[in-house]
């Protein structure tokens, strides 16, 4: 059937890094919203930020199997760093973004050693604890952070010295979307690399990963630090585009919401965070305009159904309605009956 | 010449229990050596001491003459000591291609390469293919590991260890649970392992031990009970009594 196994291997491997049509369409659509729905740019900006935040959680949860209930620690730190920098003179958004991401990365690196020991329950508690501690520090240090009143007086300069932020949120959205896209491309590259593969192997079976010679802890520290930087960047985007930071950025519900977003969209799937963010925000918008007090009831119900029914099964059903994806499998001349694990 | 793998006075206590009792053991270069012993004899503890999952209470472990007693497990693998597991330890959501590719790229030192796609490095594809052919996995390379037939999973289990290009390979009951129909294929691949890899086989199945090994060590209650060439051990009445389960007066 196959003339040469080396060619087969090469074909399969080169398939990994390639962009699919659906992916390109996804990003083209996202870009199109910049021009076609100006009145929605404020909420789209929020979606892009939440999407990036969920993507950062996916890097550790979906790809490395590290559970976290305190991912807001990095998001919040990034937001405060970016906000404070802008307030005290560094008005360039990109520089602020970079510093905020580095700050969050540093926090991620130093707490990774606490997080990497112990069971999932330990991890949940340690991450939760770190976020709570940070939240309380921000609350107490009101001379710096503004405490419960929030950090006010943030003045952002134009992006690259060219694009001023406007009140419709168009510049803000373009900025957030671009940053999210760039970081997404980087993450996409990482997950198909040998490094990304080793993360998945650790998630699947750390015992065997060690037996293959993988320095498990080292790899986990790396991805935890990177994920923290991503979350910090998302927080910075929020601070810069809304020009306000409140204690809310470190609150428990942020960590919980981002987990929710990721579960809705799909864990271990790079688009999961982005799709989840869209679904979550749109649902929030629709349900809360229909029944403002009870929107959490509905989101809770959806979450329970989703987890019980299993998102995998639901997406498989949707995929079955799509005859093209099936035929593509057929004519790709692979001897496979079953789909290999999804990885992007 | 230094032994491929050697232990000196290796002892492991768990509280009052002596799981490994003063074991001094030599695995010669290129050996086909079997380690047998009744259930609870301490075979698993011994393996865990060799691979670094456990640290010994006392005694030393040497790999090709260099002491590795306190070396971390992954560093032992990088120095050429790998194992397979009695119960499959695979990556269920990954394909055999990815699994072998992972092991090969780790060994080539590109495991922390986060920028390139797997297999973009030269040589890696040829090596994946060579291993896949050796372990008869070419026709299932792109399937999910969890969907493979059990015999294929056992082959992959050995293939992953082999992909680390070991100097010493510890095979922990490689044929355990493999149905009769798939058994032959597995045994043939084990027999065809290259001679420059020294193999320690931990096994219950006496047919496999006798067909594969040229030396046997018997572990009883954590201590080395007997050791010698296959013929000698198989006819030793003491060994037959404690292990082979045959009555001495036969």
Image (cartoon, coloured by chain):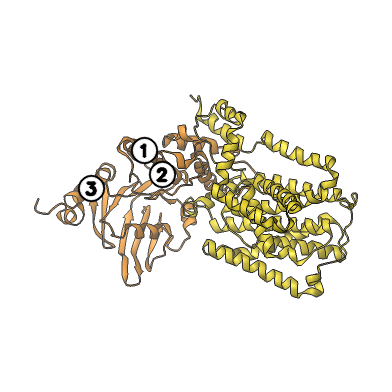
Residue B117, how many percent across, how many down?
Answer: 62, 41
Mark seen at residue A138: none
Q: From where the camera sits, is residue A106 visible? A: no
Height in image: B96 above or below B204?
Answer: above
> How far apart are the two marked residues, 3 and 1, measured between alpha carbons?
21 Å
Q: Which residue is mark 2?
A: B158
Q: Earlier in the sequence, mark 3 or mark 1?
A: 1
Q: Which residue is mark 3?
A: B230
Look at chain A in the picture and name its colour. yellow
Circles 3 and 2: CB atoms closer than 8 Å? no
Which residue: 33% across, 42% down? B178
Q: Is residue B124 left or right of residue B209?
A: right
- Label 3: chain letter: B
Of residue B142 and residue B192, the one placed in the foreground of this image is: B142
Discs 2, 1: same chain: yes
Q: Earlier in the sequence, mark 3 or mark 2?
A: 2
- Label 1: chain letter: B
Circles 2 and 1: CB atoms closer than 8 Å? yes
Question: Which quarter of the picture shows residue A152?
Answer: bottom right
Q: Give the foreground label among 3 and 1.
A: 1
Q: Give the foreground label among 3 and 2.
A: 2
Q: Is residue A3 left or right of residue B224?
A: right
Look at chain B in the picture and name its colour. orange
Of residue B14 and residue A246, the one placed in the foreground of this image is: A246
Q: From where the camera sits, is residue B104 visible? A: yes
Label 2 environment density (alpha carbons within 10 Å; few <14, some 14–19, many ≥20): many
Q: Which residue is mark 1?
A: B189
Of residue B165 and residue A193, the one placed in the foreground of this image is: A193
């Amino acid at each position: 059937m196959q003339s040469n196994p080396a060619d087969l291997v090469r074909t399969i491997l080169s398939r990994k890094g390639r962009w699919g049509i659906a992916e390109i369409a996804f990003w083209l659509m996202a870009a199109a919203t910049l021009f076609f729905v100006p009145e929605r740019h404020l909420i789209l900006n929020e979606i892009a930020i939440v999407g990036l935040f969920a993507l950062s959680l996916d890097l550790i949860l979906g790809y490395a199997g590290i559970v976290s209930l305190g991912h807001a620690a990095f998001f919040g730190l990034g937001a405060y760093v970016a906000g404070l920098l802008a307030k005290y003179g560094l008005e360039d958004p990109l520089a602020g973004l970079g510093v905020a991401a580095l700050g969050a990365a540093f926090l991620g690196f130093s707490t990774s050693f606490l997080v990497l020991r112990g069971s999932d329950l330990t991890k949940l508690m340690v991450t939760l604890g770190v976020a709570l501690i940070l939240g309380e520090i921000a609350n107490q240090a009101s001379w710096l952070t503004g405490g419960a009143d929030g950090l006010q007086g943030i003045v952002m300069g134009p992006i690259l010295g060219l694009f001023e932020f406007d009140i419709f949120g168009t510049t803000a959205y373009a900025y957030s979307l671009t940053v999210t896209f760039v970081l997404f491309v980087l993450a996409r590259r990482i997950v198909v690399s040998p490094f990304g593969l080793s993360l998945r192997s650790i998630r699947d079976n750390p015992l065997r990963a060690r037996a293959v010679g993988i320095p498990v802890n080292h790899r986990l520290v790396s991805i935890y630090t990177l994920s923290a930087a991503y979350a910090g960047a998302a927080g910075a985007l929020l601070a810069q585009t809304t020009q306000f930071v409140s204690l809310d950025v470190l609150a428990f519900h942020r960590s919980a919401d981002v987990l929710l977003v990721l579960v809705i969209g799909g864990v271990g799937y790079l688009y999961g965070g982005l799709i989840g963010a869209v679904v979550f925000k749109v649902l929030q918008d629709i349900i809360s305009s229909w029944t403002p007090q009870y929107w959490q009831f509905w989101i809770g119900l959806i979450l329970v159904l989703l987890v019980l029914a299993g998102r995998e099964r639901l997406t498989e059903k949707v995929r079955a309605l799509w005859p093209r994806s099936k035929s593509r499998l057929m004519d790709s001349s692979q001897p496979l009956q079953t789909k290999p694990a999804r990885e992007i | 010449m230094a032994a491929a793998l050697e232990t000196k006075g290796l002892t492991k206590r768990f509280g009052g229990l002596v799981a490994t009792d003063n074991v001094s053991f030599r695995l010669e270069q290129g050996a086909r050596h079997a380690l047998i012993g009744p259930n609870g004899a301490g075979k698993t503890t011994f393996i865990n001491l060799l691979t670094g999952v456990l640290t010994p209470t006392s005694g030393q472990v040497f790999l090709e003459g260099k002491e590795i007693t306190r070396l971390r497990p992954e560093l032992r693998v990088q120095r050429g000591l790998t194992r397979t597991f009695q119960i499959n330890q695979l990556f269920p959501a990954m394909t055999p291609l990815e699994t072998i590719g992972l092991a090969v790229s780790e060994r080539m030192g590109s495991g922390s390469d986060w920028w390139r796609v797997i297999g973009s490095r030269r040589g890696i594809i040829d090596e994946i293919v060579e291993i896949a052919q050796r372990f008869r996995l070419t026709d299932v390379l792109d399937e999910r590991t969890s969907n493979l037939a059990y015999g294929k999973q056992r082959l992959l289990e050995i293939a992953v260890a082999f992909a680390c290009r070991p100097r010493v390979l510890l095979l922990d009951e490689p044929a355990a649970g493999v149905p009769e129909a798939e058994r032959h294929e597995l045994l043939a691949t084990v027999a065809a392992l290259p001679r420059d890899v020294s193999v320690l086989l931990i096994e219950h199945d006496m047919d496999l031990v006798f067909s594969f090994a040229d030396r046997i060590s018997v572990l009883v209650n954590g201590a080395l009970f007997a050791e010698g060439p296959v013929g000698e051990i198989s006819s030793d009445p003491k060994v037959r009594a404690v292990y082979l389960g045959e009555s001495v007066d036969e």
